[in-house]
Amino acid sequence: MQAAQSALHPRWSAWQPRAGQAVSLKDLNPGAKPFSLGSKAEDKAAVEALAVELDALQNLFYADRRYKLLVVLQGTDTSGKDGTIRGVFGRMSALGVHTVGWKAPTEPERARDYLWRIHQQVPAAGEITVFNRSHYEDVLVPPVNGWITPEQHRQRLAHINDFERMLCETGTVVLKFMLHISKDEQRQRLQERLDDPSKHWKFDRSDLTARAQWDDYQRAYEQLLAATHTPWAPWTIVPADSKTHRNLMIATVLRAALQGLQLRYPPGDPALEKIKVE
Amino acid sequence: MQAAQSALHPRWSAWQPRAGQAVSLKDLNPGAKPFSLGSKAEDKAAVEALAVELDALQNLFYADRRYKLLVVLQGTDTSGKDGTIRGVFGRMSALGVHTVGWKAPTEPERARDYLWRIHQQVPAAGEITVFNRSHYEDVLVPPVNGWITPEQHRQRLAHINDFERMLCETGTVVLKFMLHISKDEQRQRLQERLDDPSKHWKFDRSDLTARAQWDDYQRAYEQLLAATHTPWAPWTIVPADSKTHRNLMIATVLRAALQGLQLRYPPGDPALEKIKVE
Protein backbone atom coordinates (compact mmCIF):
# COMPACT_ATOMS: atom_id res chain seq x y z
CA MET A 1 0.00 0.00 0.00
CA GLN A 2 2.66 2.51 -0.92
CA ALA A 3 1.19 3.25 -4.30
CA ALA A 4 1.36 7.00 -3.80
CA GLN A 5 5.13 6.66 -3.69
CA SER A 6 5.66 4.43 -6.66
CA ALA A 7 3.77 6.93 -8.78
CA LEU A 8 6.36 9.67 -8.26
CA HIS A 9 6.43 12.18 -11.07
CA PRO A 10 9.92 13.49 -11.96
CA ARG A 11 8.89 17.14 -11.64
CA TRP A 12 7.00 16.33 -8.46
CA SER A 13 9.84 15.23 -6.23
CA ALA A 14 11.48 18.67 -6.19
CA TRP A 15 8.34 19.92 -4.42
CA GLN A 16 8.34 17.27 -1.72
CA PRO A 17 10.16 17.50 1.60
CA ARG A 18 13.26 15.28 1.83
CA ALA A 19 13.45 12.65 4.56
CA GLY A 20 15.31 13.92 7.60
CA GLN A 21 15.83 17.42 6.18
CA ALA A 22 14.42 20.76 7.28
CA VAL A 23 11.95 22.48 4.95
CA SER A 24 12.55 26.11 4.04
CA LEU A 25 9.42 27.62 2.50
CA LYS A 26 11.14 30.89 1.62
CA ASP A 27 13.43 28.95 -0.72
CA LEU A 28 10.41 27.64 -2.64
CA ASN A 29 9.03 30.22 -5.07
CA PRO A 30 5.21 30.50 -4.77
CA GLY A 31 5.17 31.88 -8.33
CA ALA A 32 6.99 28.89 -9.86
CA LYS A 33 5.26 26.84 -12.57
CA PRO A 34 7.17 23.55 -12.74
CA PHE A 35 4.33 21.71 -14.49
CA SER A 36 3.46 24.41 -17.02
CA LEU A 37 3.15 23.46 -20.68
CA GLY A 38 4.12 26.97 -21.81
CA SER A 39 1.22 29.39 -21.96
CA LYS A 40 -1.67 29.96 -19.57
CA ALA A 41 -4.11 28.94 -22.33
CA GLU A 42 -2.34 25.60 -22.75
CA ASP A 43 -2.32 25.04 -19.00
CA LYS A 44 -6.03 25.84 -18.77
CA ALA A 45 -6.84 23.35 -21.54
CA ALA A 46 -4.66 20.74 -19.80
CA VAL A 47 -6.55 21.20 -16.51
CA GLU A 48 -9.85 20.72 -18.35
CA ALA A 49 -8.59 17.54 -20.01
CA LEU A 50 -7.20 16.26 -16.72
CA ALA A 51 -10.49 16.88 -14.92
CA VAL A 52 -12.20 14.64 -17.49
CA GLU A 53 -9.51 11.95 -17.07
CA LEU A 54 -9.82 12.16 -13.31
CA ASP A 55 -13.57 11.69 -13.55
CA ALA A 56 -13.02 8.43 -15.46
CA LEU A 57 -10.36 7.28 -12.99
CA GLN A 58 -12.67 8.05 -10.07
CA ASN A 59 -15.39 5.89 -11.64
CA LEU A 60 -12.93 3.02 -11.91
CA PHE A 61 -11.71 3.66 -8.35
CA TYR A 62 -15.30 3.40 -7.15
CA ALA A 63 -15.94 0.14 -9.02
CA ASP A 64 -12.61 -1.40 -8.00
CA ARG A 65 -13.28 -0.81 -4.26
CA ARG A 66 -9.88 -2.13 -3.15
CA TYR A 67 -8.70 1.32 -2.01
CA LYS A 68 -9.79 4.47 -0.25
CA LEU A 69 -8.30 7.85 -1.13
CA LEU A 70 -7.85 10.70 1.31
CA VAL A 71 -6.73 14.02 -0.15
CA VAL A 72 -5.65 16.67 2.36
CA LEU A 73 -5.61 20.33 1.25
CA GLN A 74 -3.80 22.72 3.57
CA GLY A 75 -2.73 26.32 3.13
CA THR A 76 -3.16 29.77 4.66
CA ASP A 77 -6.33 31.80 4.06
CA THR A 78 -6.86 32.64 0.36
CA SER A 79 -4.33 30.00 -0.72
CA GLY A 80 -6.95 28.45 -3.00
CA LYS A 81 -8.33 25.36 -1.27
CA ASP A 82 -11.93 26.01 -2.41
CA GLY A 83 -10.77 26.80 -5.93
CA THR A 84 -8.79 23.54 -6.06
CA ILE A 85 -11.88 21.56 -5.13
CA ARG A 86 -13.88 23.25 -7.90
CA GLY A 87 -11.13 23.05 -10.52
CA VAL A 88 -9.70 19.58 -9.87
CA PHE A 89 -12.55 17.58 -8.30
CA GLY A 90 -15.48 19.46 -9.86
CA ARG A 91 -16.09 16.97 -12.66
CA MET A 92 -16.17 13.88 -10.46
CA SER A 93 -19.42 12.22 -9.44
CA ALA A 94 -20.70 13.15 -5.99
CA LEU A 95 -21.48 9.44 -5.61
CA GLY A 96 -17.91 8.58 -4.72
CA VAL A 97 -16.35 11.92 -3.82
CA HIS A 98 -16.95 13.72 -0.57
CA THR A 99 -15.57 17.03 0.65
CA VAL A 100 -15.23 17.82 4.33
CA GLY A 101 -14.55 21.41 5.37
CA TRP A 102 -13.06 21.63 8.85
CA LYS A 103 -13.91 24.53 11.14
CA ALA A 104 -13.07 25.17 14.80
CA PRO A 105 -14.08 22.13 16.88
CA THR A 106 -17.49 22.05 18.56
CA GLU A 107 -17.91 21.31 22.27
CA PRO A 108 -18.48 17.52 21.87
CA GLU A 109 -15.39 17.45 19.62
CA ARG A 110 -13.26 19.31 22.17
CA ALA A 111 -14.36 16.77 24.81
CA ARG A 112 -12.50 14.00 22.90
CA ASP A 113 -9.05 13.74 21.38
CA TYR A 114 -8.51 16.02 18.36
CA LEU A 115 -8.36 13.05 15.92
CA TRP A 116 -11.82 11.80 16.97
CA ARG A 117 -13.78 13.91 14.50
CA ILE A 118 -11.17 13.40 11.78
CA HIS A 119 -11.27 9.60 11.97
CA GLN A 120 -15.07 9.63 11.60
CA GLN A 121 -14.79 11.25 8.17
CA VAL A 122 -12.17 9.00 6.53
CA PRO A 123 -13.21 7.53 3.18
CA ALA A 124 -14.89 4.12 2.83
CA ALA A 125 -13.73 1.54 0.28
CA GLY A 126 -14.01 3.00 -3.23
CA GLU A 127 -14.49 6.54 -1.95
CA ILE A 128 -12.45 9.68 -2.39
CA THR A 129 -12.61 12.18 0.48
CA VAL A 130 -11.13 15.65 0.18
CA PHE A 131 -10.30 17.45 3.42
CA ASN A 132 -10.51 21.25 3.09
CA ARG A 133 -8.19 21.93 6.05
CA SER A 134 -7.65 18.91 8.29
CA HIS A 135 -6.04 17.52 11.43
CA TYR A 136 -3.03 19.62 10.43
CA GLU A 137 -4.85 22.68 11.78
CA ASP A 138 -4.27 21.05 15.19
CA VAL A 139 -0.51 21.41 14.72
CA LEU A 140 -0.80 24.96 13.35
CA VAL A 141 -3.26 27.10 15.32
CA PRO A 142 -2.58 25.75 18.84
CA PRO A 143 1.26 25.90 18.72
CA VAL A 144 1.28 29.31 16.99
CA ASN A 145 -1.02 30.69 19.70
CA GLY A 146 0.76 28.90 22.56
CA TRP A 147 -2.29 26.77 23.47
CA ILE A 148 -0.26 23.55 23.62
CA THR A 149 3.21 22.87 25.00
CA PRO A 150 6.16 21.99 22.73
CA GLU A 151 5.90 18.45 24.18
CA GLN A 152 2.23 18.20 23.20
CA HIS A 153 3.14 19.59 19.78
CA ARG A 154 5.72 16.82 19.29
CA GLN A 155 3.25 14.20 20.54
CA ARG A 156 0.64 15.37 18.03
CA LEU A 157 3.05 15.15 15.10
CA ALA A 158 3.79 11.54 16.16
CA HIS A 159 0.07 10.73 16.60
CA ILE A 160 -0.63 12.01 13.11
CA ASN A 161 2.12 9.85 11.59
CA ASP A 162 0.82 6.80 13.48
CA PHE A 163 -2.77 7.52 12.42
CA GLU A 164 -1.88 7.97 8.76
CA ARG A 165 0.29 4.83 8.74
CA MET A 166 -2.65 2.86 10.12
CA LEU A 167 -4.89 4.30 7.37
CA CYS A 168 -2.31 3.36 4.73
CA GLU A 169 -1.87 -0.17 6.07
CA THR A 170 -5.63 -0.67 5.97
CA GLY A 171 -5.98 0.34 2.32
CA THR A 172 -6.12 4.15 2.26
CA VAL A 173 -3.97 6.18 -0.11
CA VAL A 174 -3.18 9.47 1.62
CA LEU A 175 -2.08 12.46 -0.49
CA LYS A 176 -1.37 15.79 1.15
CA PHE A 177 -1.03 19.15 -0.61
CA MET A 178 0.25 22.35 0.96
CA LEU A 179 -0.84 25.35 -1.12
CA HIS A 180 2.07 27.77 -0.93
CA ILE A 181 1.30 31.44 -1.68
CA SER A 182 3.39 34.55 -1.11
CA LYS A 183 2.53 37.09 1.56
CA ASP A 184 2.02 39.68 -1.16
CA GLU A 185 -0.38 37.46 -3.11
CA GLN A 186 -2.38 36.96 0.09
CA ARG A 187 -2.55 40.74 0.61
CA GLN A 188 -4.04 41.18 -2.88
CA ARG A 189 -6.55 38.37 -2.43
CA LEU A 190 -7.70 39.60 0.98
CA GLN A 191 -7.98 43.17 -0.34
CA GLU A 192 -10.13 41.91 -3.22
CA ARG A 193 -12.48 40.29 -0.75
CA LEU A 194 -12.76 43.57 1.14
CA ASP A 195 -13.24 45.74 -1.94
CA ASP A 196 -16.04 43.57 -3.39
CA PRO A 197 -19.20 43.38 -1.20
CA SER A 198 -20.21 40.14 -2.97
CA LYS A 199 -17.01 38.60 -1.55
CA HIS A 200 -17.49 39.82 2.02
CA TRP A 201 -18.97 36.44 3.03
CA LYS A 202 -15.56 34.93 2.40
CA PHE A 203 -13.84 37.41 4.71
CA ASP A 204 -13.34 36.85 8.39
CA ARG A 205 -11.62 39.32 10.73
CA SER A 206 -9.57 36.44 12.11
CA ASP A 207 -7.91 36.22 8.68
CA LEU A 208 -6.08 39.44 9.55
CA THR A 209 -4.99 38.07 12.93
CA ALA A 210 -3.52 35.01 11.22
CA ARG A 211 -1.88 37.27 8.61
CA ALA A 212 -0.18 39.21 11.40
CA GLN A 213 1.25 35.85 12.54
CA TRP A 214 2.45 35.00 9.01
CA ASP A 215 6.03 34.13 9.99
CA ASP A 216 4.90 31.94 12.90
CA TYR A 217 2.54 30.03 10.63
CA GLN A 218 5.23 29.56 7.98
CA ARG A 219 7.50 28.13 10.68
CA ALA A 220 4.76 25.80 11.96
CA TYR A 221 4.18 24.66 8.35
CA GLU A 222 7.87 24.00 7.85
CA GLN A 223 7.92 21.95 11.04
CA LEU A 224 4.90 19.81 10.12
CA LEU A 225 6.07 19.32 6.53
CA ALA A 226 9.41 17.98 7.74
CA ALA A 227 7.86 15.84 10.49
CA THR A 228 4.91 14.31 8.66
CA HIS A 229 6.19 13.75 5.11
CA THR A 230 6.24 9.95 5.16
CA PRO A 231 6.41 7.13 2.63
CA TRP A 232 2.80 6.29 3.52
CA ALA A 233 1.41 9.85 3.41
CA PRO A 234 3.60 12.18 1.33
CA TRP A 235 3.29 15.96 1.15
CA THR A 236 3.48 17.97 -2.04
CA ILE A 237 4.19 21.67 -1.70
CA VAL A 238 2.24 23.40 -4.47
CA PRO A 239 3.36 26.85 -5.65
CA ALA A 240 -0.06 28.51 -5.63
CA ASP A 241 0.24 32.14 -6.71
CA SER A 242 -1.07 30.99 -10.13
CA LYS A 243 -4.50 29.38 -9.78
CA THR A 244 -4.36 27.61 -13.13
CA HIS A 245 -0.96 26.12 -12.52
CA ARG A 246 -1.95 25.11 -8.98
CA ASN A 247 -4.82 23.07 -10.39
CA LEU A 248 -2.63 21.67 -13.16
CA MET A 249 0.00 20.47 -10.68
CA ILE A 250 -2.46 18.92 -8.24
CA ALA A 251 -4.46 17.22 -11.00
CA THR A 252 -1.27 15.81 -12.53
CA VAL A 253 -0.02 14.42 -9.22
CA LEU A 254 -3.45 12.98 -8.48
CA ARG A 255 -3.67 11.28 -11.88
CA ALA A 256 -0.21 9.76 -11.42
CA ALA A 257 -1.22 8.41 -8.00
CA LEU A 258 -4.46 6.90 -9.32
CA GLN A 259 -2.72 5.40 -12.35
CA GLY A 260 -0.11 3.87 -10.05
CA LEU A 261 -2.82 1.83 -8.33
CA GLN A 262 -3.42 -0.37 -11.40
CA LEU A 263 -7.17 0.01 -10.93
CA ARG A 264 -9.45 -2.52 -12.61
CA TYR A 265 -13.12 -3.40 -12.75
CA PRO A 266 -13.81 -6.38 -10.46
CA PRO A 267 -13.69 -9.68 -12.40
CA GLY A 268 -16.93 -10.34 -14.32
CA ASP A 269 -19.22 -13.24 -13.50
CA PRO A 270 -19.55 -15.68 -16.47
CA ALA A 271 -22.94 -16.81 -15.13
CA LEU A 272 -24.28 -13.27 -15.55
CA GLU A 273 -23.42 -13.28 -19.24
CA LYS A 274 -25.85 -16.12 -19.86
CA ILE A 275 -28.82 -14.32 -18.32
CA LYS A 276 -31.36 -12.98 -20.80
CA VAL A 277 -33.45 -10.16 -19.41
CA GLU A 278 -37.02 -10.77 -20.62
CA MET B 1 -1.15 10.83 32.11
CA GLN B 2 0.22 7.57 33.45
CA ALA B 3 -2.02 7.57 36.47
CA ALA B 4 -3.16 4.00 35.84
CA GLN B 5 0.43 2.91 36.47
CA SER B 6 1.15 4.91 39.57
CA ALA B 7 -1.90 3.35 41.20
CA LEU B 8 -0.40 -0.15 41.07
CA HIS B 9 -1.78 -2.42 43.76
CA PRO B 10 0.76 -4.87 45.25
CA ARG B 11 -1.43 -7.92 44.58
CA TRP B 12 -2.27 -6.58 41.15
CA SER B 13 1.15 -6.66 39.54
CA ALA B 14 1.42 -10.47 39.70
CA TRP B 15 -1.57 -10.56 37.31
CA GLN B 16 -0.12 -8.20 34.76
CA PRO B 17 2.11 -9.19 31.85
CA ARG B 18 5.78 -8.26 32.30
CA ALA B 19 7.43 -5.96 29.76
CA GLY B 20 9.26 -7.94 27.10
CA GLN B 21 8.20 -11.33 28.45
CA ALA B 22 5.92 -13.96 26.98
CA VAL B 23 2.60 -14.60 28.73
CA SER B 24 1.67 -18.17 29.60
CA LEU B 25 -2.04 -18.39 30.48
CA LYS B 26 -1.82 -22.02 31.52
CA ASP B 27 0.53 -20.96 34.34
CA LEU B 28 -2.12 -18.57 35.69
CA ASN B 29 -4.77 -20.38 37.73
CA PRO B 30 -8.31 -19.28 36.68
CA GLY B 31 -9.51 -20.42 40.11
CA ALA B 32 -7.07 -18.24 42.07
CA LYS B 33 -8.44 -15.61 44.46
CA PRO B 34 -5.55 -13.23 45.13
CA PHE B 35 -7.79 -10.40 46.37
CA SER B 36 -10.05 -12.52 48.58
CA LEU B 37 -10.68 -11.40 52.15
CA GLY B 38 -11.25 -14.98 53.29
CA SER B 39 -14.82 -16.20 52.83
CA LYS B 40 -17.21 -15.76 49.94
CA ALA B 41 -19.59 -13.81 52.20
CA GLU B 42 -16.86 -11.32 53.06
CA ASP B 43 -15.92 -10.95 49.40
CA LYS B 44 -19.55 -10.35 48.45
CA ALA B 45 -19.91 -7.65 51.09
CA ALA B 46 -16.66 -6.06 49.89
CA VAL B 47 -17.92 -5.94 46.29
CA GLU B 48 -21.11 -4.22 47.48
CA ALA B 49 -19.13 -1.66 49.46
CA LEU B 50 -16.77 -1.09 46.53
CA ALA B 51 -19.66 -0.55 44.13
CA VAL B 52 -20.92 2.26 46.40
CA GLU B 53 -17.42 3.78 46.60
CA LEU B 54 -17.05 3.55 42.84
CA ASP B 55 -20.35 5.36 42.37
CA ALA B 56 -19.04 8.27 44.47
CA LEU B 57 -15.72 8.28 42.60
CA GLN B 58 -17.55 8.29 39.27
CA ASN B 59 -19.56 11.35 40.36
CA LEU B 60 -16.34 13.14 41.20
CA PHE B 61 -14.77 11.97 37.93
CA TYR B 62 -17.73 13.46 36.05
CA ALA B 63 -17.50 16.80 37.90
CA ASP B 64 -13.71 17.00 37.56
CA ARG B 65 -13.83 16.55 33.78
CA ARG B 66 -10.03 16.49 33.37
CA TYR B 67 -9.96 12.84 32.37
CA LYS B 68 -11.76 10.22 30.32
CA LEU B 69 -11.79 6.57 31.35
CA LEU B 70 -11.92 3.66 28.94
CA VAL B 71 -12.38 0.21 30.46
CA VAL B 72 -11.87 -2.74 28.11
CA LEU B 73 -13.37 -6.11 29.06
CA GLN B 74 -12.12 -9.08 27.06
CA GLY B 75 -12.54 -12.81 27.55
CA THR B 76 -13.88 -15.91 25.86
CA ASP B 77 -17.62 -16.65 25.76
CA THR B 78 -19.12 -17.08 29.27
CA SER B 79 -16.06 -15.51 30.91
CA GLY B 80 -18.35 -13.04 32.68
CA LYS B 81 -18.16 -9.72 30.82
CA ASP B 82 -21.89 -8.98 31.23
CA GLY B 83 -21.78 -10.01 34.88
CA THR B 84 -18.83 -7.70 35.51
CA ILE B 85 -20.76 -4.76 34.09
CA ARG B 86 -23.72 -5.52 36.36
CA GLY B 87 -21.63 -6.22 39.45
CA VAL B 88 -18.97 -3.51 39.20
CA PHE B 89 -20.54 -0.68 37.22
CA GLY B 90 -24.18 -1.32 38.12
CA ARG B 91 -24.39 1.31 40.84
CA MET B 92 -22.92 4.14 38.78
CA SER B 93 -25.12 6.82 37.21
CA ALA B 94 -25.95 6.27 33.56
CA LEU B 95 -25.26 10.00 33.15
CA GLY B 96 -21.52 9.50 32.98
CA VAL B 97 -21.11 5.79 32.29
CA HIS B 98 -21.69 4.19 28.91
CA THR B 99 -21.38 0.58 27.87
CA VAL B 100 -20.65 -0.41 24.29
CA GLY B 101 -21.13 -4.04 23.26
CA TRP B 102 -19.18 -4.92 20.14
CA LYS B 103 -20.57 -7.39 17.62
CA ALA B 104 -19.34 -8.43 14.17
CA PRO B 105 -18.75 -5.31 12.05
CA THR B 106 -21.52 -4.06 9.74
CA GLU B 107 -20.92 -3.35 6.06
CA PRO B 108 -20.15 0.39 6.48
CA GLU B 109 -17.75 -0.58 9.28
CA ARG B 110 -15.99 -3.16 7.14
CA ALA B 111 -15.57 -0.51 4.42
CA ARG B 112 -13.25 1.48 6.75
CA ASP B 113 -10.30 0.53 8.92
CA TYR B 114 -11.21 -1.65 11.90
CA LEU B 115 -10.47 1.14 14.41
CA TRP B 116 -12.96 3.52 12.78
CA ARG B 117 -15.99 2.34 14.75
CA ILE B 118 -13.94 1.96 17.94
CA HIS B 119 -12.63 5.53 17.87
CA GLN B 120 -16.18 6.90 17.50
CA GLN B 121 -17.15 5.42 20.86
CA VAL B 122 -14.27 6.62 23.04
CA PRO B 123 -15.34 8.49 26.19
CA ALA B 124 -15.70 12.28 26.32
CA ALA B 125 -14.21 14.36 29.14
CA GLY B 126 -15.65 13.23 32.49
CA GLU B 127 -17.12 10.06 31.00
CA ILE B 128 -16.47 6.41 31.71
CA THR B 129 -16.96 4.04 28.78
CA VAL B 130 -16.93 0.28 29.23
CA PHE B 131 -16.20 -1.82 26.15
CA ASN B 132 -17.83 -5.27 26.28
CA ARG B 133 -15.39 -6.85 23.82
CA SER B 134 -13.38 -4.31 21.84
CA HIS B 135 -10.80 -3.71 19.10
CA TYR B 136 -9.00 -6.73 20.59
CA GLU B 137 -11.51 -8.95 18.80
CA ASP B 138 -9.73 -7.78 15.62
CA VAL B 139 -6.52 -9.45 16.81
CA LEU B 140 -8.34 -12.60 17.96
CA VAL B 141 -10.98 -13.78 15.49
CA PRO B 142 -9.18 -12.89 12.20
CA PRO B 143 -5.76 -14.41 13.05
CA VAL B 144 -7.31 -17.54 14.62
CA ASN B 145 -9.36 -18.08 11.48
CA GLY B 146 -6.57 -17.15 9.08
CA TRP B 147 -8.42 -14.11 7.69
CA ILE B 148 -5.38 -11.85 8.04
CA THR B 149 -1.71 -12.52 7.38
CA PRO B 150 0.88 -12.67 10.20
CA GLU B 151 2.19 -9.35 8.84
CA GLN B 152 -1.26 -7.74 9.13
CA HIS B 153 -1.58 -9.24 12.61
CA ARG B 154 1.69 -7.58 13.68
CA GLN B 155 0.61 -4.28 12.08
CA ARG B 156 -2.67 -4.34 14.00
CA LEU B 157 -0.96 -4.91 17.33
CA ALA B 158 1.22 -1.85 16.58
CA HIS B 159 -1.80 0.24 15.45
CA ILE B 160 -3.57 -0.56 18.71
CA ASN B 161 -0.56 0.50 20.80
CA ASP B 162 -0.29 3.75 18.78
CA PHE B 163 -4.03 4.40 19.12
CA GLU B 164 -4.07 3.80 22.86
CA ARG B 165 -0.98 5.94 23.41
CA MET B 166 -2.68 8.78 21.57
CA LEU B 167 -5.76 8.35 23.79
CA CYS B 168 -3.59 8.38 26.91
CA GLU B 169 -1.64 11.47 25.80
CA THR B 170 -4.93 13.30 25.20
CA GLY B 171 -6.30 12.61 28.68
CA THR B 172 -7.81 9.11 28.57
CA VAL B 173 -7.04 6.52 31.24
CA VAL B 174 -7.17 3.11 29.57
CA LEU B 175 -7.63 0.02 31.75
CA LYS B 176 -7.87 -3.41 30.15
CA PHE B 177 -9.12 -6.60 31.82
CA MET B 178 -8.80 -10.10 30.40
CA LEU B 179 -11.28 -12.44 32.13
CA HIS B 180 -9.45 -15.74 32.41
CA ILE B 181 -11.62 -18.86 32.87
CA SER B 182 -10.73 -22.52 32.61
CA LYS B 183 -11.92 -24.68 29.73
CA ASP B 184 -13.84 -26.80 32.22
CA GLU B 185 -15.61 -23.79 33.73
CA GLN B 186 -16.64 -22.74 30.22
CA ARG B 187 -18.06 -26.22 29.57
CA GLN B 188 -20.23 -25.96 32.68
CA ARG B 189 -21.45 -22.45 31.87
CA LEU B 190 -22.27 -23.31 28.25
CA GLN B 191 -24.07 -26.48 29.38
CA GLU B 192 -26.13 -24.41 31.84
CA ARG B 193 -27.22 -22.15 29.01
CA LEU B 194 -28.29 -25.19 26.97
CA ASP B 195 -30.10 -26.90 29.84
CA ASP B 196 -32.15 -23.84 30.80
CA PRO B 197 -34.53 -22.59 28.04
CA SER B 198 -34.64 -19.15 29.70
CA LYS B 199 -30.90 -18.90 28.99
CA HIS B 200 -31.10 -20.00 25.34
CA TRP B 201 -31.03 -16.35 24.17
CA LYS B 202 -27.49 -16.13 25.51
CA PHE B 203 -26.37 -19.17 23.49
CA ASP B 204 -25.01 -18.96 19.99
CA ARG B 205 -23.91 -21.98 17.95
CA SER B 206 -20.71 -20.11 17.08
CA ASP B 207 -19.78 -20.36 20.79
CA LEU B 208 -19.11 -24.06 20.15
CA THR B 209 -16.96 -23.29 17.10
CA ALA B 210 -14.86 -20.91 19.17
CA ARG B 211 -14.68 -23.52 21.96
CA ALA B 212 -13.27 -26.03 19.48
CA GLN B 213 -10.54 -23.46 18.75
CA TRP B 214 -9.83 -22.98 22.48
CA ASP B 215 -6.05 -23.49 22.24
CA ASP B 216 -5.74 -21.16 19.25
CA TYR B 217 -7.63 -18.43 21.10
CA GLN B 218 -5.52 -18.87 24.21
CA ARG B 219 -2.41 -18.47 22.06
CA ALA B 220 -3.83 -15.34 20.38
CA TYR B 221 -4.65 -13.94 23.83
CA GLU B 222 -1.11 -14.64 25.05
CA GLN B 223 0.26 -12.86 22.00
CA LEU B 224 -1.91 -9.74 22.42
CA LEU B 225 -1.34 -9.58 26.17
CA ALA B 226 2.42 -9.59 25.67
CA ALA B 227 2.30 -7.13 22.75
CA THR B 228 -0.19 -4.57 24.05
CA HIS B 229 0.50 -4.37 27.78
CA THR B 230 1.94 -0.86 27.87
CA PRO B 231 2.63 1.80 30.49
CA TRP B 232 -0.19 3.86 28.96
CA ALA B 233 -2.77 1.04 28.68
CA PRO B 234 -2.00 -1.85 31.04
CA TRP B 235 -3.69 -5.24 31.04
CA THR B 236 -4.84 -7.08 34.13
CA ILE B 237 -5.46 -10.80 33.80
CA VAL B 238 -8.40 -11.60 36.08
CA PRO B 239 -8.85 -15.18 37.32
CA ALA B 240 -12.56 -15.49 36.59
CA ASP B 241 -13.80 -18.95 37.57
CA SER B 242 -15.24 -17.28 40.71
CA LYS B 243 -17.72 -14.55 39.79
CA THR B 244 -17.59 -12.83 43.17
CA HIS B 245 -13.83 -12.70 43.26
CA ARG B 246 -13.69 -11.52 39.63
CA ASN B 247 -15.85 -8.53 40.55
CA LEU B 248 -13.87 -7.91 43.73
CA MET B 249 -10.60 -7.83 41.84
CA ILE B 250 -11.80 -5.58 39.03
CA ALA B 251 -13.54 -3.18 41.43
CA THR B 252 -10.41 -2.97 43.58
CA VAL B 253 -8.14 -2.24 40.62
CA LEU B 254 -10.61 0.32 39.30
CA ARG B 255 -10.85 2.10 42.65
CA ALA B 256 -7.06 2.25 42.91
CA ALA B 257 -6.84 3.75 39.42
CA LEU B 258 -9.50 6.38 40.14
CA GLN B 259 -7.96 7.25 43.51
CA GLY B 260 -4.58 7.64 41.80
CA LEU B 261 -5.99 10.47 39.67
CA GLN B 262 -6.35 12.84 42.64
CA LEU B 263 -9.80 13.84 41.44
CA ARG B 264 -11.32 17.08 42.76
CA TYR B 265 -14.36 19.22 42.20
CA PRO B 266 -13.49 22.15 39.94
CA PRO B 267 -12.59 25.29 41.94
CA GLY B 268 -15.68 27.14 43.17
CA ASP B 269 -16.56 30.64 41.94
CA PRO B 270 -16.61 33.17 44.84
CA ALA B 271 -19.02 35.36 42.86
CA LEU B 272 -21.58 32.56 42.88
CA GLU B 273 -21.57 32.44 46.67
CA LYS B 274 -22.90 36.00 46.82
CA ILE B 275 -25.93 35.30 44.62
CA LYS B 276 -29.25 35.10 46.46
CA VAL B 277 -31.85 33.10 44.58
CA GLU B 278 -35.16 35.02 44.96
Image (cartoon, coloured by chain):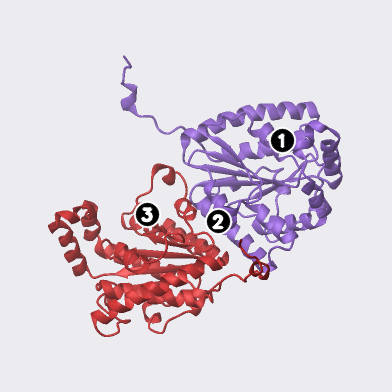
Chain colours: A red, B purple
Question: Could you tell me which quadrant the N terminus of chain A lies in?
Answer: bottom right
- Name the quadrant containing residue B192: top right
Residue, disc 1:
B83
The one of B146 and A87 positioned closer to us in this rendering: A87
Chain ID, mark 3: A
Q: Relative to residue B186, is residue A80 drawn left or right?
A: left
Q: Relative to residue B40, is residue A51 drawn left or right?
A: left
- Closer to us: mark 1 or mark 3? 3
Vertical relation: A82 (above or below) B64: below
Q: CA distance from mark 1 to mark 3?
A: 42 Å
Chain ID, mark 2: B
Tag 2's secondary structure?
helix
- Name the quadrant containing residue B32: top right
Is residue A167 visible in this depiction of the protein? yes
- In the image, what residue type sits under mark 2? Phe
- Name the quadrant containing residue B219: bottom right
The percent coordinates of residue A263 (x first, y second) are 53, 74
Disc 1 + disc 2, Cβ < 8 Å: no
Disc 3 crowd, CA 10 A, few/some/many (<14, 14-19, 20+): some
The one of A177 and B242 positioned closer to us in this rendering: A177
Residue, disc 2:
B163
